[in-house]
Image (tube, grey):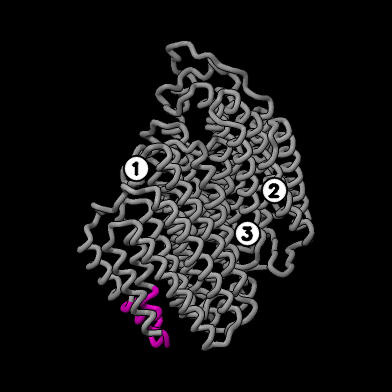
Amino acid sequence: MNFLIIILLVTSLLLTRVSRLKTAVTIILIQSFMVALACGIDGLEAGAVHMYVAAILTAVIKVGLIPYALLNIVEKLQYEREDHPILNVNSSSVTACIAIVLAYGLIDQALPGANSRDALATALAMTLIGLLIIMTRRQAIMQIVGLITMENGIYLVGLSATKGLPLIIEMGIFFDVLVAVVVLVILTHRLKLSGMSTDISRLKKLKG
Amino acid sequence: MGELLLLALFFPLITGLLSMFQNKVVTIKSLNLVGSSMTSSVLAVIVFRISTQGAFLNGLLYVDSLSAVLLTVVAALGLTSMVFSLSYMEKELVEGHITIKMLQRYYGLFNVFIFTMISVLVVENLGLMWVAVEATTLASALLVAFYFNQSALEAAWKYVMVCTVGICLALLGTILLYYAQVNVVGINVQALSWLELKTIASKLDPTITKLAFIFILIGYGTKAGLAPMHTWLPDAHSQAPSPISGLLSGALLSCAIYAIVRNLIVVQAVLNHEFLQYLLIGLALFSIGIAIPFILVQHDIKRLLAYSSVEHMGIVLLGIGISTPLAIYGALLHVINHAIAKSTLFYLAGIITQEYKTKHIMRIRGLIRTMPLVGTLFIISILAITGTPPFSLFISKFTIIWASFNDGRFWLGAGVLFLLAGIFAGMMYYCLEMVFGNPGHNISVGKVGKPALWSIFFSIGLMIVTGLYVPFWLHTLLIKAASVIMGGE
């Protein structure tokens, strides 16, 4: 478990440093794979069937379909890179580290003595780092990656706090995540089609 | 009853699916008219049965008087918005703004959107409700981006991003609430069922519940367009096709408020009442207040209406925050009234922008000369939305402010009245400019479609009737729903 947690933190920290979109998608693929693994291992320990199903669903949707859709669109965006994020990479990494410390502090405050302290803190840190990426990155694909990181973090909170949610709710959540990414990919594709850059910060027609 | 609920979920889905495969405009139109009337009639029957027989529970489906109030909104707006769409979208097609493929997509997504909103209101589980609320965002996102031009894409991107991040926080809150539940009863089959949560509410851990509710309020508050999380709202409302703006503003925001209220019912048993009241009233005042500058200085007719929605969601939350039975009664009545009035205004704005080919308030002048009927209806609706008698919004706003004075909150009531006066001034100023201003150049105006006018007449009729007299069944339904929010059965 500890090994998984370390890899998850490393992937989240790496995300604050990438500028190539393809690398970012690969990192998110590895991260989602670790989340699926964590879910499977937890299910093995608890002997709960519904967690195997959840692990398989995570693998199919977050390791399979979503990265596939993202890689597909990234292929078409050859000239798009995250070169000048709103917060530069070094500051982003430092902020992400602060987020990790903050997450530990929050968990110790809100849920003192929780038996999965490290997992909970990592999960919360991932949520915060995901939010950081959404707020400070210009590229559409990077914002989607941030959203998935955030979602992975929240999923991990559920996994470590309550052994996941009931299966029917979890299936609904997976479906929503999948559709959300599909909708965002369609929007990105349309941005590209209409000859615009997929740099979201250039979209500022609507004001007031 | 269970069958009726399944039918209400089934009709929009099947109508949407069939619309995707029709190539003739006439077929699509009649199919959707029939489908939408069937959905709304089934919903009306459900509301009637709930008001006479009481709550209904079957597995994961649950409807009580509170859901019935919201189902009334979806039934009314689903129908008026569909009828208005018939002529609005046909005109878009004739003028060459959209193709038949886009028309199929429009009706397909429209029906899925209705389906997701009904699902929010009929599930008996906070987790599934979350899934349904997120689904409403996704179904409506492609409707906001419908024209796929730069502004529409910008609005849709902002909409999906802001709302999904917001709603992820609500998921975090929901998981925390589940954690609190698990600590009391262990992992069982009743996970996140709110009837179950309500019975064990007093045993929940107050710290975790408080944290959970704050996340939930921020999350669903984003969806409900409460300031300061409202930033997506004016963009999405102004870029979506007008019938969809009406649905977003009237029905979707109300559904998000419903999600907040369902969580509130659970947590109010364990949290400090004063804390909750300060939180809700503070958020409400901020939403009303922040709308004023944007309404006073506005250049876009649909954004004007969108900011007014932020204000009205603030008023609804104010009623819920004051939390006396009278205030909650007023808030629920206001949900219905706002939905009908605001959707009518968006329909009218749709007609106006279609004829003037601009959303710019400066360029819309002399409605009373170019389109006398539409101009008159527009003035009537603006008077209604700002809370002038004899329209129904006067009654609900009056009730909420009366409840605030009654509860000994003199300054709150007076302050809100003052803010409302400011909003009235802004809305009236722009309305009069648009209606009585000098058109300057000649504007050729086409004929307004019959169905569009019918749906507007129907809505205005409802506003006047309920303004003069709240029907008895609605009155009892609202009283029962208010007692549900207060923590009763």
The picture places residue B250, in percent across and down from the top left corner, at 57, 44
The picture places residue B258, in percent across and down from the top left corner, at 57, 57
Q: Considering the whole magenta stretch, tell me its main secondary structure.
A: helix
Say what secondary structure mark 3 lies in.
helix
In the image, residue A120 lies in the stretch drawn in magenta: yes
Amino acid identity at mark 1:
Ser
Q: Which residue is mark 3?
A: B482
Range shown magenta: A104-123
Q: Which residue is mark 2?
A: B12
Q: Is residue B190 above or below residue A77?
A: below
Point 64% across, 29% down: residue = B87
Q: Give the quadrant of the C terminus of chain B.
A: bottom right
Residues beneath discs 1 and 3 located on the same chain: no
Q: Which residue is mark 1?
A: A197
Depth check, front residue: B479 or B251: B251
Say what secondary structure mark 1 lies in.
loop
Indicate left or right for B399 with B287 as reference. right
Residue B189 visible in image: yes
Which chain is disc 3 placed on? Answer: B
